[in-house]
Amino acid sequence: MISGAEALMRSLVAEGVDTIFGYPGGAIIPVFDRLYDYRDKLRHILVRHEQGATHAAQGYARVSGRTGVVMVTSGPAATNVITGLGDAMMDSTPLVVITGQVSSELLGSDAFQETDVIGITQPLTKWSYQIRNVEDLRWAVARAFYIASTGRPGPVVLDFSKDAQVAMMEWTGYKKCHFVRTYEPAPEISDADVDTVAKMIDEARRPLIISGHGVEIAGGEPQLLALAEKAHIPVTTTLLGLSTIDSDSPLFKGFVGMHGNVAANVAIGQCDLLVAVGMRFDDRVTGDVAHFANQAKIVHIDIDSSEFGKIIKPDATIHGDAREVLGRLAAKVAPARHDEWFASFDKAWAVEQENVVAPELDDNSRITMGRVARKVAEAAGKGAVLVTDVGQNQMLSARYFKYTAPRSIITSGGLGTMGFGLPASIGAKIAAPERTVCFFTGDGGLQMTVEELGVILQYGIDVKIVLLNNNFLGMVRQWQTLFFNRRFSATQLVNPNFVMLANSYGIPAEDVETLDQLDAAIGRMLAHKGAYLLNINIDPEELVYPMTPAGAPISTILLGNGEIYEN
């Protein structure tokens, strides 16, 4: 006979869990007490805020491909994980979040730190369940890991009442879940659908692939490359799909969307077949949907059929796992060459190089965000992981970083959560200690979860922090500059001394004020064994280009030189 808390520990071990991100408290103390005896099997990372636990678990999950695990107490701890649940749901990240809860006889009585966790979390999770009976624990844990990690991944919440934690049960072993009635995470792929799409690809003269986050989730990068090489199809990506193809591949034509590459966005308006894989046609990708790829036939491949036709109406669909679908298409399509189509990208690429890239990287009078990102990527070498916060730092680091391996960009896409980056970088480094983790952030985003520097201090996490500091909420300021007559309302920041702040957490840091200091500072940061922070002072007037204004067609592109490129 063992307690529910002990049964939870055994269940987590049986699921292969090795790391938990969390924060203890009254309603979860029995579980943390049992965790003490599992220190050799379950590493617990004590965060400084429960939101940080969820983002750290997201970073861990996104780099490792495994399910991230969070464990916190009830009440305010449970409500503090809500942002992370929303972020994980939007970006299809598998999490199992275990919250403590008051004893079941107190539910509904407004007991101390009681919160309706199930009611709050159901809209933001794939499944939420309250464990009141200890006999339900193993079933609930097994089901939670199965649901979180299969199909289109996402977060699951288990709300564990205190009386169930201490209640006794007979332990007869643990059985993983492999089936839930009415839940079909691995749909059978239609041969007819594959044949239809393969024929469409064979007949296309100007085919284009958009590779989304679903390709990464499925581990479909080799199959994507095989299809693109055999059928000679240019590949663009979404923001979260960026590392699904090598940045230096001649097939790669940039990422699409509001701040995407000119050539990639222009191609959407020129292709005759658009193959969208593992993506959901977010508004930041499509721009004005009425003008999105009107001239093209559209194929949508996704494991979540609810995405079909939700925003863009496809001409054909394949419902299934991206890796399997891409592999079957690669075997089915005929070898082809589209040299004229590939050559057509040169004009738009040249426009971007001349009007955006050259001013960003060749201006020797100032430090620019793009220059910093490119220099850090080149110095970090192959296999480096980019973690970003949200805002200008996110867009420019994503554009100029180099991706040579899968699962190399961790960023908050759908929810756009400022404060995501620091805890996510911690989780990423824990998941992949052998890889260099470069965290790009702005001064606004860093201060939203700056307390997680304490985790770096306590556990010696080796994260390279690149702070692009312009003393403003930069992306909001950009919109105020371009669309609100430079009325800078509530966007200027009065910041602390970030070098002193980092030093107080035992992290070496330095200010970078001028361009001639940059290379040496990057070298010192990357050579240092342990975390390091560069506080790089950026001109607040610097804006992120290219840019498609919200609501405009995706091929209407601001270049930053006063010109609008339209095609």
Image (tube, rainbow, N blue to C red):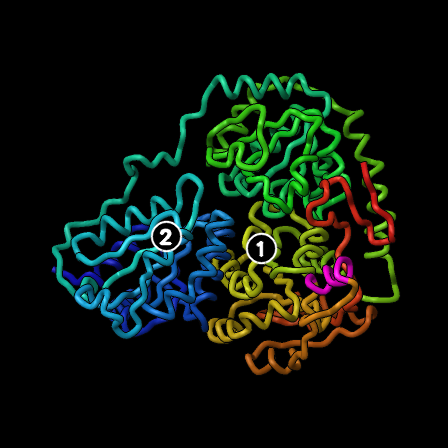
Q: Position of residue 116 (x, y in %)?
A: 31, 62
Q: Position of residue 397 (x, y in %)?
A: 69, 56
195 left or right of 491 in image: left
For disc 1, the neighbor class at 10 Å (few under 14, some 14 to 19, many from 20) is many
Rendered position, 200 above or below 117 = above
Of the image marks 2 and 1, the number of the one nearer the N terminus: 2
Residue 185 falls in which quadrant of the image?
top left
Badge 1 element: loop
Instruction: List the residue tagged with mark 1.
Output: 411
- Front disc: 2 or 1: 2
Using the image as rendered, state which of residue 384 and residue 133 is in the foreground.
133
Residue 388 falls in which quadrant of the image?
bottom right
**Amino acid of disc 1:** Thr
Residue shown at the point (60%, 46%) measured from the top left: 405
* Residue 553 part of the magenta-drawn span: no
Name the quarter where the C terminus is drawn: top right
Residue shown at the point (84%, 66%) measured from the top left: 366
State the predominant SS element of the stretch in magenta.
helix
Using the image as rendered, state which of residue 433 and residue 170 is in the foreground.
170
> Which mark is on residue 430?
none
Residue shown at the point (15%, 50%) measured from the top left: 172
Using the image as rendered, state which of residue 421 and residue 222 is in the foreground.
421
Badge 2 element: helix
Name the quarter where the N terminus is drawn: bottom left
542 left or right of 435 in image: right
The span from disc 2 to disc 1 (Cα, nearest Å) is: 24 Å
475 left or right of 515 in image: left
Using the image as rendered, state which of residue 533 and residue 199 is in the foreground.
199
Residue shown at the point (39%, 41%) measured from the top left: 150
Instruction: List the residue tagged with mark 2.
Output: 122
For disc 2, the neighbor class at 10 Å (few under 14, some 14 to 19, many from 20) is some
* Magenta-colored span: 475-484
